[in-house]
Image: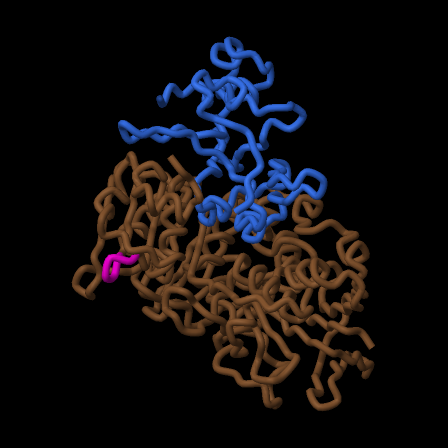
Amino acid sequence: MPKYVIVGGSAGGIGAVEAIREVDPVGTITMISEEPSPQYSRPMISDYLSGEATLVKMKYRDDRFWEKNKVQALTARKAVGVNLTSKYVELDEGDRVGFEKLLIATGGKPFVPKMEGREKDGVFTFTDLSNAETLAAKVERGKRAVVIGGGLIGVSVTEALVKRGVKVTIVELKDRILNLILDAAASEIVEKVMRQAGVTIVTGQTVQRIEGRRDNDGAVVGVLLTNGEEIPCDLVVIAIGVIPRTELAVGTEIKMNRGILVDRFMRTSVADVYACGDVAEAYDFISERNSLLPLWPVAQLGGRVAGYNMAGKKTEYPGGTVMSALKYFDIPIISAGIAVSEESNGYDVLVDHHPARNLYKKIALKDDVIVGMTFVGDIEKAGIIFHLMKKHVHVRDFKEGLISENFGLVTIPAPLRKKLFMMGD
Amino acid sequence: MGCGLCEVFCIAQHSKSKDLIKAYKKEHPRPLSRVRVEVDRPLSFSVQCRHCEDPPCVIACLSGAMHLDEETGLVIHDADKCMGCWTCVMVCPYGTIRVDVSGKVVAKCDLCQGFDVPACVANCPNEALVYQEVTP
């Protein structure tokens, strides 16, 4: 019986393997993944679609990763159930894999609303490599696509399609794109550059029906918006969001909210069972509550912490938060913590905005502690601000300088610089 | 004293020719300095990657380009694998990972691998930069 069983071989599962092996070089590990070769970078699927990344470039870890870490990799296999009393995972075809410690790192799946026509030929989701490969095979210069959802996935797939010569209309239900991670001023800059790249942005609408050809194959011919407008297209990408793949935990005593609840050691409510990544609801260091954070770096970190704890090295999870770095349409953006903050809702807001040059900096404070940050265009010092935010540093004495051109480690008061950054003078 | 020579020699070191004059006159775009001089008079200093033991940039890297070199313990960036997502820029406490001149990948200090002493240290006229191992 393997000592450690990990369900899921992406960011979280890989992070866990690396951490376990730092502590326990010999304990047996079995990893179960539905994908044939899960050790690739999912965030890079848009670069694959655009043609900028090859399958080789996409390797997050090399193909010998499992072997080098002495992991029994059960790839292209599906975990269909878990028995927490007898401590085993049930696989497709009825096999059982017993465990001493279990990590559920099953990730998320695309949310597809009950939309008429969603089964038509030419409708795609976009979260894993197989989605990207299927879509890439259908893409041709001059085709028209409708992307439903103006979040991170929607914008990334839009950019990739534009690079492939596809004419894209992006449809967002709210009044602006990227509304969960950017405020209005930052969204506006992105919308401007997207329009300049030829993208049509429709906001305040969604698709009520996907229309297909009446004749033989039912191929997509367009979408019908809620306002009755029709947009002809050849491809539809549903990019509304991801939801946790909690199926393994459903019906067990593992406590769940929207995702599997874990404590600061990535433990679920059941002994010896851990969870991390998109499937888990773990600690958020800004809201100071558990929340869903379906983000690659958060998954990798959660996986590492889970791995250490599974192997007996007690390690506290520092927490994640909403944190996004965007590269799309040649505008670098970093946004983390509370993105939409106004003085009217009790935040102290520092802003430096040059819309004509696509430059924007905003820092939100609550009681002189940074709780949100957005950097558009010039992102070099964003990491220093992120660190101050993560450490909940009181910045009253130097907050005016935080968005100045000259801001840096040098403008942080010496005692704090020494303590936080281990830099003397 | 904020002379900026560390930046100048870093640029030369990371140029194709490794020659100061050629790097400045002939190479377009000119390579990016991996060190940054910060000045707030009377204080000034040079900042570059600290090569953290538990590097946030490596954990956060979306592509696997940023990694800890097993032999040297240095935080090394493989530009061929970099997807230019800027996640490492977001999580570097020191702000020492920079968007490279191409705008497509990041650039960072590699401690001038293959040389005994990094170029910034070797050419610091005031011996303000020293090269030593520190334990946190």
Q: Position of residue B59 (x, y in %)?
A: 57, 53
Q: Is residue A366 magenta?
A: yes
Q: Position of residue B126 (x, y in %)?
A: 43, 18
Q: Is residue A285 left or right of residue A367?
A: right
* Viewer-side residue, B80 vs A22: A22
* Viewer-side residue, A375 vs B68: B68
Q: Is residue A233 above or below residue A418?
A: below
Main secondary structure type of the part rendered in magenta: strand
Residue drawn at (35%, 59%) of the image: A392
Q: Is residue A424 left or right of residue A141?
A: left
The brown-tinted chain is: A
What scheme was used to colour the molecule?
by chain
Q: Which residues are magenta?
A: A365-369
**Shade representing chain B:** blue
Task: Please indicate, yes or no, whether residue A178 appears anywhere in the rendered image.
Answer: no
Q: Is residue B43 magenta?
A: no
